[in-house]
Each structure stands twice: as C-alpha cells, then as structure tokens.
Image (tube, rainbow, N blue to C red):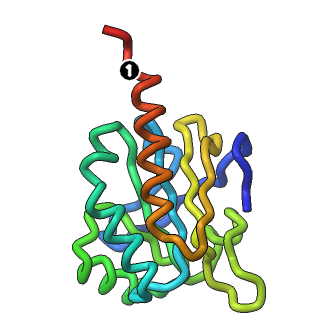
Amino acid sequence: MLKVGERAPEIDKVAIDGQRFVLSSQGGLCTVVYFFPKAFTRDCTVEAQLFRDNHAEIALAGASIVGISTDDHRTQCRFAETHKVPYPMIADRDRSVCRAYDVLWPLIGIARRITYVIAPTMEIAAVFHHEFQARKHRDDVLSFINERFRAARPAV
C-alpha cells in the first residue's frame, strides 16, 4: 500500500463509459481513487452505493471520484449500470493500476479495499483501508474532503 506524501502513479485508462480517465488531468480539490475486490459482492455494492449517494456532495466540494476493480469490462459495466453509478469506473483486468498502487491481495490477485485521496499535484493526501467496514471509506473520505474544502475556501 502506498503512503501519504508519495507520488501517485498515473492512471490512464478507458473507463466503462468509454471516456479516457487520466488522473493527472482531473484537477479540482482532489481525486478519490477507491479500489474494491469484486463487483456484485455485498460490501463492494455497499461501498459503490455510498459513493454514489454522496457523489453530489463530493463534486460540490470540488473533488472527483473513480472506482477500480480487477473485474472485466463487461462485469464492471453491468455493476455500474445496475447501481446507477454516476462517476467513472475502471475495469483493471490486467491489474496494471492495482499493481502500481500496491493494492492486490497476495495469491488471490484481487484488489484490497483501499481508498486514496490524490491531490492535484499527484501527491497522495490520504489513505483509508478498512477491509471489512466499507462504510468507513465514505465517512473518512467525506470528513477529509470537507476539512480540505474548508481550508481551501477563502475567508469571508
């Protein structure tokens, strides 16, 4: 797992919506990059739905979000469509992004539940890892983004 302060590896992949997702082009306050093990499993579904339900709040704070798993493109598309996910999702079947971010479980080769918050400078600003508490990722991300947003806002 990468650590706060390290440079985030570039992500340049086509998302399930057919659009190219390039991490360094995201700009804004920060980008939330969350990795999850498998589409359509209970906790992965909960996590995707929580980020979906809070997508507007995250976007209003100036942040973007992307979900990544080792599922194939077709599965990832079905998952996003079924749960009406409004943000990009990436099927990392070749595991190149998961390897770069050091999130793969040894032996089984699927992503661990790790969320990175990446600053526009490509520096990792926060890391959250709650393998069995999917809700904590959303809670931690919202707290972090809200604090960062308040700090970035000019005083009135």
Residue drawn at (38%, 79%) of the image:
45
Q: Residues within 10 Å of mark 1 (few under 14, many from 20)?
A: few
Residue drawn at (46%, 23%) of the image:
151
Residue nearest the observer in this picture, 129 or 59: 129
User: For this view, does 135 lie left or right of residue 5?
Assistant: left
Q: Secondary structure at mark 1?
A: loop
Residue nearest the observer in this picture, 36 or 46: 46
Q: Position of residue 49 (x, y in %)?
A: 32, 70
Residue 103 falls in image quadrant: bottom right
114 shown above or below 9: below
In which quadrant is the C terminus drawn? Answer: top left
105 shown above or below 68: below
Residue 108 falls in image quadrant: bottom right
User: For this view, does 16 lie left or right of residue 68?
Assistant: left
User: For this view, does 2 lie left or right of residue 94?
Assistant: right
Q: Position of residue 6 (x, y in %)?
A: 73, 45
Give the farthest residue toward the right. Answer: 106
In which quadrant is the N terminus drawn? Answer: bottom right
Residue drawn at (73%, 51%) of the image:
3
Q: Position of residue 34 (x, y in %)?
A: 51, 63
State the count of labels. Answer: 1
Q: Position of residue 13 (x, y in %)?
A: 49, 65
Residue drawn at (30%, 86%) of the image:
78
Residue nearest the observer in this picture, 135 or 22: 135
Q: Amino acid at mark 1?
A: Arg
Residue 43 falls in image quadrant: bottom left
Judging by the rendered image, the residue that carries numbered circle 1 is: 153
